[in-house]
Image: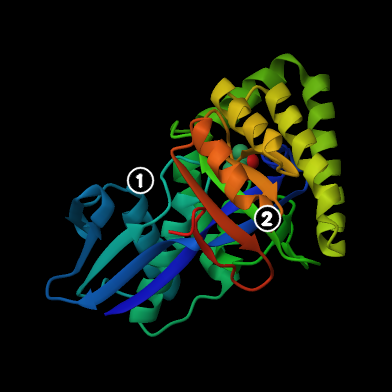
Amino acid sequence: MLERSAPGKVILCGEHSVVYGRPAIAVPVAGLRARAQIEPVHGDLRIVAADLGEEFWLRNAPVKQPLAAIARLTLARLDAAEPDARLTVRSELPIAAGLGSGAAVSVAVARALAAFLGHKLDAEAASALAYEVEKIHHGTPSGIDNTVIAWEQPVYFIKGAAPEIFTIGAPFWLLIANSGIPSSTRAAVQRVRQRRAAERACYTAYFARMGQLADKARRVISAGDITVLGPLLDKNHTLLRQLGVSLPALDRLVASARAAGALGAKLTGGGMGGNVIALVRVEQKAAVAEALRQAGAVQVWETLVKNENGTQMNADGR
Ligand code: MEV
Protein backbone atom coordinates (compact mmCIF):
# COMPACT_ATOMS: atom_id res chain seq x y z
CA MET A 1 0.00 0.00 0.00
CA LEU A 2 1.35 3.38 -1.00
CA GLU A 3 -0.01 6.69 0.30
CA ARG A 4 0.38 10.33 -0.67
CA SER A 5 -1.32 13.25 1.04
CA ALA A 6 -1.83 16.97 0.59
CA PRO A 7 -2.77 19.73 3.07
CA GLY A 8 -5.70 22.10 3.22
CA LYS A 9 -5.18 25.83 2.91
CA VAL A 10 -6.37 29.17 4.21
CA ILE A 11 -6.25 32.47 2.37
CA LEU A 12 -4.91 35.20 4.66
CA CYS A 13 -5.63 38.12 2.35
CA GLY A 14 -7.04 38.62 -1.13
CA GLU A 15 -9.71 36.01 -1.88
CA HIS A 16 -12.00 37.15 -4.71
CA SER A 17 -9.76 40.09 -5.68
CA VAL A 18 -7.21 37.42 -6.74
CA VAL A 19 -9.67 36.31 -9.45
CA TYR A 20 -9.32 39.85 -10.92
CA GLY A 21 -5.53 39.84 -11.04
CA ARG A 22 -4.72 41.29 -7.61
CA PRO A 23 -2.18 39.59 -5.31
CA ALA A 24 -3.28 37.28 -2.51
CA ILE A 25 -1.47 35.32 0.17
CA ALA A 26 -2.31 31.83 1.36
CA VAL A 27 -0.76 29.27 3.70
CA PRO A 28 -1.10 25.49 3.92
CA VAL A 29 -2.82 23.85 6.87
CA ALA A 30 -0.48 20.92 7.35
CA GLY A 31 -2.55 19.07 9.93
CA LEU A 32 -5.77 18.85 7.91
CA ARG A 33 -5.08 16.57 4.96
CA ALA A 34 -6.54 14.65 2.06
CA ARG A 35 -5.01 11.18 1.59
CA ALA A 36 -4.92 8.83 -1.38
CA GLN A 37 -3.88 5.20 -0.90
CA ILE A 38 -3.21 2.89 -3.82
CA GLU A 39 -2.64 -0.86 -3.94
CA PRO A 40 -2.48 -3.43 -6.73
CA VAL A 41 -5.66 -5.40 -7.51
CA HIS A 42 -6.89 -7.19 -10.63
CA GLY A 43 -9.07 -5.45 -13.20
CA ASP A 44 -8.18 -1.85 -14.14
CA LEU A 45 -8.47 1.20 -11.89
CA ARG A 46 -11.11 1.13 -9.17
CA ILE A 47 -11.66 4.42 -7.33
CA VAL A 48 -13.07 4.48 -3.80
CA ALA A 49 -14.33 7.77 -2.31
CA ALA A 50 -14.35 6.40 1.23
CA ASP A 51 -15.92 9.42 2.97
CA LEU A 52 -18.81 9.47 0.50
CA GLY A 53 -19.30 5.69 0.49
CA GLU A 54 -18.92 5.63 -3.31
CA GLU A 55 -16.79 3.45 -5.58
CA PHE A 56 -16.57 3.02 -9.32
CA TRP A 57 -14.35 1.86 -12.18
CA LEU A 58 -12.46 4.67 -13.86
CA ARG A 59 -13.63 3.47 -17.30
CA ASN A 60 -17.32 3.96 -16.28
CA ALA A 61 -16.96 7.38 -14.63
CA PRO A 62 -18.36 10.56 -16.22
CA VAL A 63 -15.87 13.03 -17.66
CA LYS A 64 -16.57 15.62 -14.96
CA GLN A 65 -16.35 13.25 -11.97
CA PRO A 66 -13.50 15.04 -10.13
CA LEU A 67 -11.62 11.92 -8.93
CA ALA A 68 -11.88 10.34 -12.37
CA ALA A 69 -10.79 13.61 -13.98
CA ILE A 70 -7.59 13.89 -11.92
CA ALA A 71 -6.81 10.21 -12.50
CA ARG A 72 -7.24 10.57 -16.29
CA LEU A 73 -5.24 13.81 -16.41
CA THR A 74 -2.40 12.20 -14.44
CA LEU A 75 -2.32 9.11 -16.67
CA ALA A 76 -2.32 11.33 -19.77
CA ARG A 77 0.53 13.45 -18.45
CA LEU A 78 2.61 10.37 -17.69
CA ASP A 79 1.54 8.75 -20.96
CA ALA A 80 0.65 5.70 -18.89
CA ALA A 81 -2.02 3.03 -19.24
CA GLU A 82 -4.63 2.55 -16.55
CA PRO A 83 -3.03 0.39 -13.84
CA ASP A 84 -4.71 -2.59 -12.15
CA ALA A 85 -5.14 -0.91 -8.79
CA ARG A 86 -7.55 0.31 -6.13
CA LEU A 87 -7.23 4.00 -5.27
CA THR A 88 -8.89 4.96 -1.98
CA VAL A 89 -9.42 8.63 -1.12
CA ARG A 90 -10.14 10.03 2.34
CA SER A 91 -10.09 13.61 3.56
CA GLU A 92 -10.01 15.30 6.95
CA LEU A 93 -11.00 18.55 5.26
CA PRO A 94 -14.62 19.66 5.36
CA ILE A 95 -16.10 19.83 1.85
CA ALA A 96 -17.41 23.18 0.57
CA ALA A 97 -15.84 25.12 3.42
CA GLY A 98 -13.18 27.29 1.77
CA LEU A 99 -10.28 25.14 2.98
CA GLY A 100 -9.21 23.74 -0.39
CA SER A 101 -10.62 20.23 -0.01
CA GLY A 102 -11.06 19.74 -3.79
CA ALA A 103 -7.49 20.77 -4.64
CA ALA A 104 -6.04 18.73 -1.76
CA VAL A 105 -7.83 15.60 -2.98
CA SER A 106 -6.61 16.21 -6.54
CA VAL A 107 -2.98 16.70 -5.50
CA ALA A 108 -3.03 13.62 -3.25
CA VAL A 109 -4.54 11.45 -6.02
CA ALA A 110 -2.19 12.72 -8.72
CA ARG A 111 0.85 12.06 -6.52
CA ALA A 112 -0.32 8.61 -5.38
CA LEU A 113 -1.09 7.46 -8.90
CA ALA A 114 2.19 8.85 -10.24
CA ALA A 115 4.17 7.18 -7.43
CA PHE A 116 2.42 3.86 -8.10
CA LEU A 117 3.59 4.14 -11.72
CA GLY A 118 7.15 4.96 -10.63
CA HIS A 119 7.05 8.74 -11.14
CA LYS A 120 7.32 11.75 -8.86
CA LEU A 121 5.25 14.84 -9.59
CA ASP A 122 6.91 18.08 -8.54
CA ALA A 123 4.82 20.92 -7.15
CA GLU A 124 4.43 22.66 -10.49
CA ALA A 125 3.19 19.51 -12.23
CA ALA A 126 0.82 18.52 -9.41
CA SER A 127 -0.54 22.06 -9.25
CA ALA A 128 -1.15 22.23 -13.01
CA LEU A 129 -3.08 18.93 -12.98
CA ALA A 130 -5.16 19.97 -9.98
CA TYR A 131 -5.93 23.32 -11.65
CA GLU A 132 -7.71 21.50 -14.47
CA VAL A 133 -10.00 19.85 -11.92
CA GLU A 134 -10.49 23.14 -10.07
CA LYS A 135 -12.09 24.41 -13.27
CA ILE A 136 -14.67 21.60 -12.99
CA HIS A 137 -15.33 22.48 -9.34
CA HIS A 138 -15.28 26.28 -9.54
CA GLY A 139 -15.61 27.43 -13.14
CA THR A 140 -13.02 30.24 -13.24
CA PRO A 141 -10.54 29.58 -10.43
CA SER A 142 -7.58 31.88 -9.90
CA GLY A 143 -5.33 28.88 -9.23
CA ILE A 144 -4.36 29.91 -5.70
CA ASP A 145 -5.76 26.77 -4.02
CA ASN A 146 -3.95 24.21 -6.17
CA THR A 147 -0.76 26.31 -5.93
CA VAL A 148 -0.48 26.67 -2.14
CA ILE A 149 -1.56 23.06 -1.66
CA ALA A 150 0.90 21.56 -4.16
CA TRP A 151 3.81 23.69 -2.90
CA GLU A 152 2.82 23.23 0.75
CA GLN A 153 4.45 26.55 1.58
CA PRO A 154 3.16 30.09 2.22
CA VAL A 155 2.60 31.66 -1.20
CA TYR A 156 2.23 35.15 -2.57
CA PHE A 157 0.10 34.58 -5.62
CA ILE A 158 -0.86 36.58 -8.68
CA LYS A 159 -3.03 34.82 -11.25
CA GLY A 160 -0.99 33.71 -14.24
CA ALA A 161 2.41 34.43 -12.60
CA ALA A 162 4.81 31.99 -10.98
CA PRO A 163 3.99 31.76 -7.25
CA GLU A 164 6.44 33.28 -4.80
CA ILE A 165 7.17 31.31 -1.65
CA PHE A 166 7.58 33.84 1.14
CA THR A 167 9.28 33.76 4.50
CA ILE A 168 7.42 33.69 7.80
CA GLY A 169 9.54 35.98 10.00
CA ALA A 170 8.03 34.63 13.23
CA PRO A 171 5.63 31.64 13.41
CA PHE A 172 2.09 32.61 14.40
CA TRP A 173 -1.08 30.81 15.46
CA LEU A 174 -4.33 30.82 13.56
CA LEU A 175 -7.64 29.40 14.71
CA ILE A 176 -9.88 28.11 11.94
CA ALA A 177 -13.57 28.01 12.82
CA ASN A 178 -16.14 26.23 10.71
CA SER A 179 -19.54 27.93 10.56
CA GLY A 180 -21.06 24.63 9.42
CA ILE A 181 -22.75 26.49 6.56
CA PRO A 182 -21.80 24.92 3.22
CA SER A 183 -20.17 27.43 0.91
CA SER A 184 -20.04 27.12 -2.87
CA THR A 185 -16.98 28.91 -4.23
CA ARG A 186 -18.54 28.81 -7.67
CA ALA A 187 -21.68 30.59 -6.41
CA ALA A 188 -19.68 33.15 -4.40
CA VAL A 189 -17.45 33.99 -7.38
CA GLN A 190 -20.54 34.26 -9.57
CA ARG A 191 -22.21 36.59 -7.09
CA VAL A 192 -19.18 38.88 -7.01
CA ARG A 193 -19.03 38.84 -10.81
CA GLN A 194 -22.66 39.93 -11.09
CA ARG A 195 -22.33 42.68 -8.51
CA ARG A 196 -19.14 43.92 -10.14
CA ALA A 197 -20.92 44.15 -13.49
CA ALA A 198 -23.47 46.49 -11.87
CA GLU A 199 -20.95 48.61 -9.89
CA ARG A 200 -17.70 48.28 -11.72
CA ALA A 201 -15.82 51.32 -10.39
CA CYS A 202 -16.69 50.47 -6.82
CA TYR A 203 -15.59 46.85 -7.14
CA THR A 204 -12.37 47.82 -8.90
CA ALA A 205 -11.58 50.02 -5.91
CA TYR A 206 -12.38 47.22 -3.43
CA PHE A 207 -10.13 44.80 -5.31
CA ALA A 208 -7.29 47.35 -5.42
CA ARG A 209 -7.53 47.83 -1.63
CA MET A 210 -7.52 44.09 -1.07
CA GLY A 211 -4.41 43.76 -3.21
CA GLN A 212 -2.69 46.48 -1.17
CA LEU A 213 -3.60 44.63 2.02
CA ALA A 214 -2.08 41.42 0.63
CA ASP A 215 1.15 43.25 -0.23
CA LYS A 216 1.33 44.80 3.20
CA ALA A 217 0.45 41.52 4.93
CA ARG A 218 3.28 39.77 3.14
CA ARG A 219 5.74 42.43 4.30
CA VAL A 220 4.66 42.34 7.94
CA ILE A 221 4.57 38.52 8.04
CA SER A 222 8.09 38.36 6.62
CA ALA A 223 9.18 40.93 9.19
CA GLY A 224 7.58 38.82 11.95
CA ASP A 225 5.33 41.70 12.98
CA ILE A 226 2.05 39.92 13.68
CA THR A 227 0.47 42.68 15.75
CA VAL A 228 0.33 44.70 12.53
CA LEU A 229 -1.14 41.71 10.67
CA GLY A 230 -4.28 41.57 12.84
CA PRO A 231 -5.79 44.91 11.68
CA LEU A 232 -5.01 43.98 8.05
CA LEU A 233 -7.13 40.83 8.43
CA ASP A 234 -9.91 42.92 9.99
CA LYS A 235 -9.82 45.37 7.07
CA ASN A 236 -9.90 42.48 4.59
CA HIS A 237 -13.03 41.13 6.30
CA THR A 238 -14.72 44.54 6.02
CA LEU A 239 -13.96 44.60 2.30
CA LEU A 240 -15.29 41.05 1.87
CA ARG A 241 -18.52 42.18 3.56
CA GLN A 242 -18.69 45.06 1.11
CA LEU A 243 -18.25 42.59 -1.76
CA GLY A 244 -21.34 40.81 -0.41
CA VAL A 245 -19.79 37.43 0.47
CA SER A 246 -20.09 37.48 4.26
CA LEU A 247 -23.09 36.29 6.25
CA PRO A 248 -24.38 37.33 9.70
CA ALA A 249 -23.15 33.95 11.04
CA LEU A 250 -19.61 34.66 9.77
CA ASP A 251 -19.67 38.24 11.09
CA ARG A 252 -20.73 36.86 14.47
CA LEU A 253 -17.77 34.44 14.55
CA VAL A 254 -15.36 37.20 13.56
CA ALA A 255 -16.75 39.58 16.21
CA SER A 256 -16.62 36.92 18.93
CA ALA A 257 -12.99 36.11 18.14
CA ARG A 258 -12.00 39.77 18.32
CA ALA A 259 -13.95 40.32 21.56
CA ALA A 260 -12.14 37.34 23.12
CA GLY A 261 -8.75 38.87 22.31
CA ALA A 262 -7.84 37.76 18.77
CA LEU A 263 -5.47 40.18 17.05
CA GLY A 264 -7.61 40.05 13.90
CA ALA A 265 -10.19 37.85 12.19
CA LYS A 266 -11.86 37.39 8.81
CA LEU A 267 -13.73 34.94 6.66
CA THR A 268 -11.48 32.82 4.47
CA GLY A 269 -12.09 31.40 0.99
CA GLY A 270 -15.15 32.08 -1.09
CA GLY A 271 -17.38 33.04 1.86
CA MET A 272 -21.20 32.84 2.03
CA GLY A 273 -20.53 30.08 4.58
CA GLY A 274 -17.44 28.04 5.29
CA ASN A 275 -14.74 29.13 7.70
CA VAL A 276 -13.31 32.14 9.47
CA ILE A 277 -9.73 32.53 10.67
CA ALA A 278 -8.57 34.32 13.81
CA LEU A 279 -4.99 35.42 14.48
CA VAL A 280 -4.13 34.70 18.11
CA ARG A 281 -1.26 34.84 20.51
CA VAL A 282 -0.57 31.46 22.06
CA GLU A 283 -1.96 32.56 25.44
CA GLN A 284 -5.30 33.58 23.84
CA LYS A 285 -5.89 30.37 21.90
CA ALA A 286 -8.14 28.61 24.39
CA ALA A 287 -10.31 31.65 25.19
CA VAL A 288 -10.78 32.59 21.53
CA ALA A 289 -11.55 28.98 20.55
CA GLU A 290 -14.18 28.81 23.27
CA ALA A 291 -15.68 32.15 22.15
CA LEU A 292 -15.88 30.85 18.58
CA ARG A 293 -17.72 27.72 19.74
CA GLN A 294 -20.10 29.81 21.83
CA ALA A 295 -20.77 31.94 18.74
CA GLY A 296 -21.78 28.87 16.72
CA ALA A 297 -18.61 27.30 15.28
CA VAL A 298 -19.17 23.57 14.73
CA GLN A 299 -15.43 22.83 14.62
CA VAL A 300 -12.38 24.84 15.65
CA TRP A 301 -8.85 23.87 14.58
CA GLU A 302 -5.55 25.54 15.31
CA THR A 303 -2.53 25.73 13.07
CA LEU A 304 0.94 27.16 13.57
CA VAL A 305 1.93 29.06 10.44
CA LYS A 306 5.60 28.64 9.63
CA ASN A 307 7.75 27.74 6.67
CA GLU A 308 8.09 24.03 7.39
CA ASN A 309 4.99 21.91 7.91
CA GLY A 310 3.01 23.26 10.86
CA THR A 311 1.40 21.20 13.56
CA GLN A 312 -2.32 21.03 14.00
CA MET A 313 -4.85 19.57 16.35
CA ASN A 314 -8.24 20.47 17.73
CA ALA A 315 -8.03 23.79 19.49
CA ASP A 316 -8.69 22.20 22.86
CA GLY A 317 -5.71 19.89 22.35
CA ARG A 318 -7.72 16.76 21.46
C1 MEV B 1 -11.09 30.28 -3.30
O1 MEV B 1 -10.33 29.60 -2.31
C2 MEV B 1 -10.76 31.72 -3.36
C3 MEV B 1 -11.48 32.58 -4.38
O2 MEV B 1 -10.66 33.75 -4.52
C4 MEV B 1 -11.66 31.92 -5.73
C5 MEV B 1 -10.36 31.73 -6.50
O3 MEV B 1 -9.35 32.32 -6.17
O4 MEV B 1 -10.43 30.97 -7.49
C6 MEV B 1 -12.84 33.02 -3.88
Callout 1: SS:
loop
**Front residue (pair 31, 316):** 316
The x, y position of residue 266, in whole percent, is: 67, 37
Callout 2: SS:
helix
Which residue: 40% across, 76% down? Answer: 114
**Which amino acid type corresponds to the residue marked 2 in the rendered image?**
Glu
Q: Quadrant of residue 166?
A: bottom right
Q: Is residue 181 visible?
A: yes
**Which amino acid type corresponds to the residue marked 1 in the rendered image?**
Lys
**Front residue (pair 124, 313):** 313
Which residue: 20% across, 50% down? Answer: 53
Question: Which colour assignment does the render follow?
Answer: rainbow
Residue corresponding to mark 2:
283
Residue 156 drawn above or below residue 167? above
Left or right side of 69 for 271? right
Question: From the image, which quarter does the N terminus lie in?
Answer: bottom left
Left or right side of 216 for 64? left
Question: From the image, which quarter does the C terminus lie in?
Answer: bottom left
* Camera-nearest label, 2 or 1: 2
The x, y position of residue 281, in whole percent, is: 71, 54
The x, y position of residue 100, in whole percent, is: 51, 50
- In three-dimensional space, the C-alpha distance between marks 2 and 1, rounded to whole angstroms, equals 46 Å
N-term mark: 2 or 1: 1
Which residue: 87% across, 49% down? Answer: 216
Q: Is residue 139 visible?
A: no
Residue corresponding to mark 1:
64
Q: Is mark 2 within 8 Å of ligand 1?
A: no
Which residue: 74% across, 41% down? Answer: 264
- Return the residue found at the far left: 42
The x, y position of residue 78, in whole percent, is: 42, 75
- Return the residue found at the far bottom: 118
